[in-house]
Amino acid sequence: MKRAEKIENRGWYFDLVRMEKHRLKDSSPATPAMSLIFALDKQLDRILAEGLENRFARHSAMAKRVQDWADEHDLSMYAPEGFRSQTVTTVKNERGWDVSALNKFLLARGMRIANGYGALKNITFRIAHMGETQMEDVDELLEAMEEFLKKG
């Protein structure tokens, strides 16, 4: 809190100093989004039950699986080695795949990937492997992508 007190322009909604002052008065600085607080509480229970190290290891294993798949298809990662996220992989679309058509195919199967943002649209695509995603989910997605690519 001492560090937070020294920060100028802390914002309004997530101003921890202001929140602490209200907490001491047993009040809140604004109407809280209770559904989000309950959802956060539930998700924190899940995270703690799994254990942080286990969760990080699962995310890392899924990232490796996606990155290995991309390597098998002669696709490069957007981020250089050492700077890659363990929760989402951004792949360079060096083979010019139709990401919109791929997503349409995946959506029919209850899955999706994300196209690149702005100038990176169709130049990259992103595959998430975070939160409650399991290795089986990643494998199912990659198998569906293989099916799409074979249809060609």
Image (cartoon, rainbow, N blue to C red):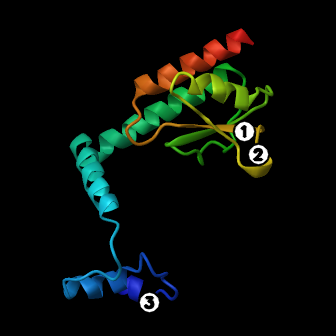
Residue drawn at x 63%, y 22% is 105
| Mark 2 neighbour density, 10 Å: few (under 14) some (14–19) many (20 or more) | few
Instruction: Name the residue rendered at 60%, 34% in the picture.
Output: 113
Q: Is residue 56 left or right of residue 99?
A: left
Q: Where does residue 136 sit, x and y in percent of width and height? A: 41, 23
Query: What crowding class fits label 3: few (fewer than 14 Cα within 10 Å), some (14-19), or many (20 or more)?
Result: few
- Which of the pair 77/26 is nearer the observer? 26
The CA span between labels 1 and 3 is 40 Å
The disc, 3 or 2, on the residue closer to the chain's N-terminal end is 3
Q: Which residue is mark 3?
A: 6
Q: Which of labels 1 and 3 is toward the front?
A: 1
Location of mark 2 (residue): 120
Residue linked to disc 1: 124
Query: Is disc 3 placed on a helix, strand or loop?
Result: helix
The answer, for residue 25, to whether it is visible in the render is yes
Instruction: Report the amino acid beneath label 2.
Output: Leu
Q: Is residue 1 visible?
A: no
